[in-house]
Amino acid sequence: MAKPQRLALFDLDHTLIPFDSGREWLQFLADRYAVPEDAPRRYLDACRRYVAGRVGLEALHRAVVCPPGAQAQALFSTWRRDFEAEMARRVPRSTLALVQRHRDAGDLCAIVTATSRLVAEPFARVFGVAQLLATEPHRAGDGSLSGDIQGEPCHREHKVAHVRRWLAAQGLALQDFERSWFYSDAAGDLPLLEAVTDPVAVRPDDKLRAVARERDWQVLGIADVAF
């Protein structure tokens, strides 16, 4: 089988979707009384502390995967199916079309996100992207979520390592592709943006916008990706 000649990588939160998937997952659970009513607010507080540099990604991951009690674990599969159906109605048609254009062109596609796999998988299915590189939740011996992260988070410079390992498992490397794209909104993703031939800033934060302008990278704004 011929190797793909082009690669398209996509960040998830605030890139393919115009919201924070972890917060939406917790709100979904709170609406079903599966987590405390204030779980989404406490998660957003953790996000603010993370942005301020007071906590690491581990705190956000723990806030997302830990709230449901042990008695709720049996309902996870049903909840995730319902969550996927609800989120499918909120995914922008513009980003669905963007991903579909790459798929139709025969490009190798993957979502590369710091979000926990627990939350990101439903979105990957909505976008029809089989390859998902995400932060892996650690499970205890009984299969329950411990709140810890398994291995390196799929975050910042670790995103590049995740991508390289995934490609190497297929006998591929980033330099094998004639063209490679990574779409992201955040300056934290600069290591992977710098590793591809075609970095694309999607509604970027201020730091990424400045870098994109300086380096003449493509920038997609609200008019281009109409959320």
Image (cartoon, helix red, strand yellow):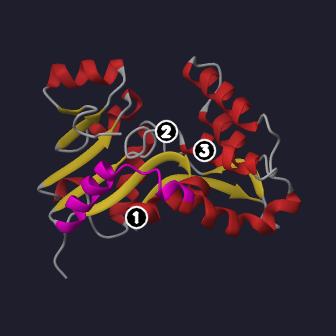
| Picture residue at 24% right of the left edge, 65% below the top | 103
Residue 57 colored magenta?
A: no
Q: Quadrant of residue 187?
A: top left
Q: Earlier in the sequence, mark 3 or mark 2?
A: 2
| Picture residue at 60% right of the left edge, 58% below the top | 83
Q: Earlier in the sequence, mark 3 or mark 1?
A: 3
For the residues labelled 3 and 2, the Cα–Cα distance comes to 8 Å
Give the quadrant of the N terminus: bottom left
Which amino acid type is shown beneath numbered disc 1? Gln
For the residues labelled 3 and 1, the Cα–Cα distance comes to 22 Å
Q: Relative to 127, is 143 on the left or the right?
A: right
Residue range in magenta is 86-104
Q: Earlier in the sequence, mark 1 or mark 2?
A: 2
Q: Residues within 10 Å of mark 1 (few under 14, many from 20)?
A: some
Q: Position of residue 117 (x, y in %)?
A: 56, 56
Q: Residues within 10 Å of mark 2 (few under 14, many from 20)?
A: some
| Picture residue at 54% right of the left edge, 63% below the top | 85
For the residues labelled 1 and 2, the Cα–Cα distance comes to 21 Å
What number is the disc on residue 24?
3
Could you tell me which secondary element the residue under label 1 belongs to? Answer: loop
Which amino acid type is shown beneath numbered disc 3? Glu
86 or 42, which lies in front? 86
What number is the disc on residue 131?
1
Q: Which residue is mark 2?
A: 19
Q: Position of residue 123 (x, y in %)?
A: 48, 57
Q: Position of residue 21 (x, y in %)?
A: 55, 45
Q: Is residue 220 above or below residue 209?
A: below
